[in-house]
């Protein structure tokens, strides 16, 4: 399935509607996603399957199992965003510095560990721990796209963005 997870795509608009629905009508579903501590916990949330069905209807095809697990991770992470209106890509938000500070919001060591995540569980755990440090800055749709398509290409793009100059 060829998902296009960018803010202006039909899938991106579907994710925005899903997030709005969670906030306004399914607070219990959002809370369940926020409590998810593993990929399986996230997969077991009905709110994930609501978004999956919406995305499958857009493309008239089903999403493969690996992408489904990653979509569940993305849903749980997006549900944890207190302000899902940010505009920055995750690595840019991670490298942001508070005024007068010489430290990135997310340390280089934590960032490297995240890029070295050896499986989906490690990726999920690492991002769950990092997101509170950058909450208001992250674009939820870009977060979802990066998680769903996590691999060497995304990791390289993150590294280039995190180490952009001037920092």
Image: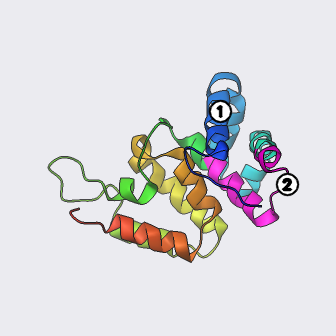
Residue shown at the point (47%, 50%) measured from the top left = 131
Q: Depth check: give the residue in front, 62 or 126.
A: 62
Report the predominant secondary structure element of the magenta stretch.
helix
Q: Quadrant of the C terminus?
A: bottom left
Task: List x then y, in percent, for residue 91.
Answer: 41, 60
Q: Depth check: give the residue in front, 102 or 41.
A: 102
Residue linked to disc 2: 61
Which numbered tag is attached to residue 51? Answer: none
Residue shown at the point (70%, 23%) measured from the top left = 25
Q: Quadrant of residue 50?
A: top right
Element at label 1: helix
Residue shown at the point (76%, 66%) measured from the top left = 66
- The residue mark sitting in front, 1 or 2, is 2
Q: Is residue 130 visible?
A: yes
Compared with 119, 77 (above or below) is above
Task: List x then y, in percent, for residue 83.
Answer: 47, 35
Q: Where does the magenta region start and end?
A: 55-76
* Distance Cα–Cα, label 1 vs label 2: 20 Å
Q: How many marks?
A: 2
Left or right of 29 in this view: 86: left
Left or right of 68 in this view: 85: left
Compared with 119, 88 (above or below) is above
Asked if residue 56 is among those painted magenta in the image, a careful observer would answer: yes
Q: Furthest residue to the right?
A: 61
Q: Is the C-beta separation of discs 1 and 2 under 8 Å?
A: no
Task: List x then y, in percent, for residue 8.
Answer: 56, 43
Crowding at label 2, few (<14), some or many (≥20) Cα neighbours within 10 Å? few
Element at label 2: loop
């Amino acid at each position: 399935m060829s998902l296009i997870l960018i803010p202006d795509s039909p899938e991106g608009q579907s994710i925005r509607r899903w997030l709005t629905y969670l906030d306004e009508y399914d607070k219990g579903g959002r809370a369940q996603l926020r409590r998810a501590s593993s990929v399986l916990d996230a997969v077991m949330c009905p709110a994930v399957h609501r978004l999956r069905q919406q995305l499958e209807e857009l493309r008239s095809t089903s999403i493969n199992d690996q992408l489904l697990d990653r979509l569940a991770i993305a849903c749980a992470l997006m549900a944890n965003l207190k302000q899902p209106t940010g505009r920055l890509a995750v690595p840019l938000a991670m490298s942001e510095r508070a005024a007068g500070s010489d430290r990135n919001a997310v340390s280089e060591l934590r960032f490297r560990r995240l890029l070295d995540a050896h499986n989906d569980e490690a990726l999920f755990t690492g991002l769950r721990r990092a997101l509170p440090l950058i909450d208001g800055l992250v674009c939820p749709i870009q977060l979802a796209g990066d998680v769903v398509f996590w691999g060497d290409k995304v990791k390289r793009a993150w590294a280039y963005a995190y180490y952009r100059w001037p920092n």
